Amino acid sequence: MISNVEVQETNKMISEANLDVRTITMGINLLDCVDCDRKKLNDKIYDKITKSAEKLVATGDEIGKEFGVPIVNKRISVTPISLVAGGSGSETHLGIAKTLDKAAKAVGVNFIGGYSALVQKGMTRADKELIHSIPEALASTDRVCSSVNVASSRSGINMDAVKLMGEIIKEAAFLTKDNSSMACAKFVVFCNAVEDNPFMAGAFHGIGEKDSVINVGVSGPGVVKRALEHVRGADFETLCETVKKTAFKITRVGQLVALEASRRLGVPFGIIDLSLAPTPAIGDSIAEIFNEMGLEHAGAPGTTAALAILNDNVKKGGVMASSCVGGLSGAFIPVSEDHGMIDAVNAGALTLEKLEAMTCVCSVGLDMVAVPGDVSAETLSGIIADEMAIGMINNKTTAVRIIPVIGANVGDTVEFGGLLGYAPVMSVNRFGCEAFIKRGGRIPAPIHSFKN
């Protein structure tokens, strides 16, 4: 039960520290839409999404207004489309992407995720067909997001898929070169993708989920920073306890919204994802938390340790507040969506290599990183391979959302708009990895993957 005191405390966090519910995401199973007739398949998909989510946006708005809690986004995730379209022929996928976009617009959500494939051990014909359609699907739609899981701690790394990911990203960048290569901002490559992630671009409705479910993502880096201001100079035990207690309070906000949305929509409650996801707004930055911890800039010596503290204690606080914490809960470090991270890049404190080191302890990986448009597909695949290896060996989710901006050079600034913000174009190591990437095959899983 949520008390009035907690509601009052929440209102203070909202008004003073940019607390918000980042997203209410409805997961929808589409496996019962499978049909070998393309028209019937698309009709079934459109009908199920629009009927299931017809009240999602209005309900989210009502809850936000009644409780005074900003609910920034309402979104939908669906069953990975490579599974849904597997028996419908090679030309079906692009049509489904457009159907998803049409349905998303009809119900008013800002993104729909699940144009996805799971290929960590190998690619089926349907997987390959979907993957090859991703660039055009993302370039020709506004709200569709896509993901591909190419590695896991149990299966290893599918290096054939990793090689293909570099090529797909380059093609997507080229097809949207007149729009800051925006298609790449809607595409993410995963190791150990989770089935209940409410955040885009990686959300999809897992095959182990119920027919439909409500997942809520709560964010509050500004709240954590404000709390740490009151313990400035204190020891690490005090710092950790402060982060943990603050995460508890933030998670309770998500619990309130999730339970209410579940009740009103008649859809089962899934999980709360407590991920400290920043925005371009001042005071809503992960990098500012690092500053408050005592670092001059994100990327300074000690940054990885600071991020490890943040990530671990956010999870500890969340687990105390709700028995249904899931998704990617922890701390995101997207460059374009965090003005403090952007400042660190511009100051020379934060490099791509340091970001990669930080992903060993953050909740996801390299996120919304802009690089020069002339970076080769093989180099992109090499960056992905490194990130997949971190996830596989450490048994954690890692991801890459990288944007080779056609026509942009190191030091340029690229505007993406809205929640995606803007990003400085970062330098990439130019030494080649082509021969390594072209080996193909699969990197076997580490020995710990045989635990049952």
Image: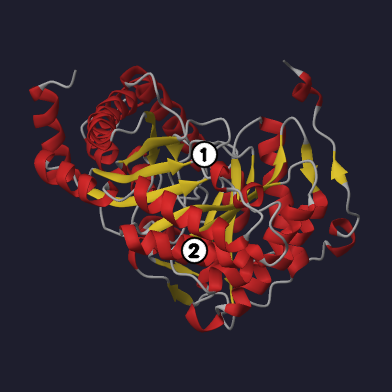
Left or right placement of residue 414 versus residue 79 in this view = left
Q: Quadrant of residue 167?
A: bottom right
Amino acid type, label 2? Thr
Residue drawn at x 62%, y 79% is 174
Residue 434 position, x and y percent, is: 85, 64
Amino acid type, label 1? Cys
Residue drawn at x 37%, y 56% is 340
Badge nearest the viewer, 2 or 1: 2
Q: Above or below — where is 250 with respect to 72?
A: above
Q: Secondary structure at mark 2?
A: helix
Q: Is residue 297 visible?
A: no
Q: Is residue 381 visible?
A: yes
**Labelled disc at residue 99:** 2
Residue 273 position, x and y percent, is: 40, 35
Residue that mark 1 sits on:
362
Q: Secondary structure at mark 1?
A: loop
Locate the N terminus and report the quarter of the image it occupies: top left
Locate the C terminus and report the quarter of the image it occupies: top right
**Colouring:** secondary structure
Left or right placement of residue 244 versus residue 4 in this view = right
Asked if the residue under mark 1 is in contact with the one under mark 2, i.e. CB atoms within 8 Å, the reply is no
Residue drawn at x 33%, y 55% is 279
Q: CA distance from mark 2 to mark 1?
A: 35 Å
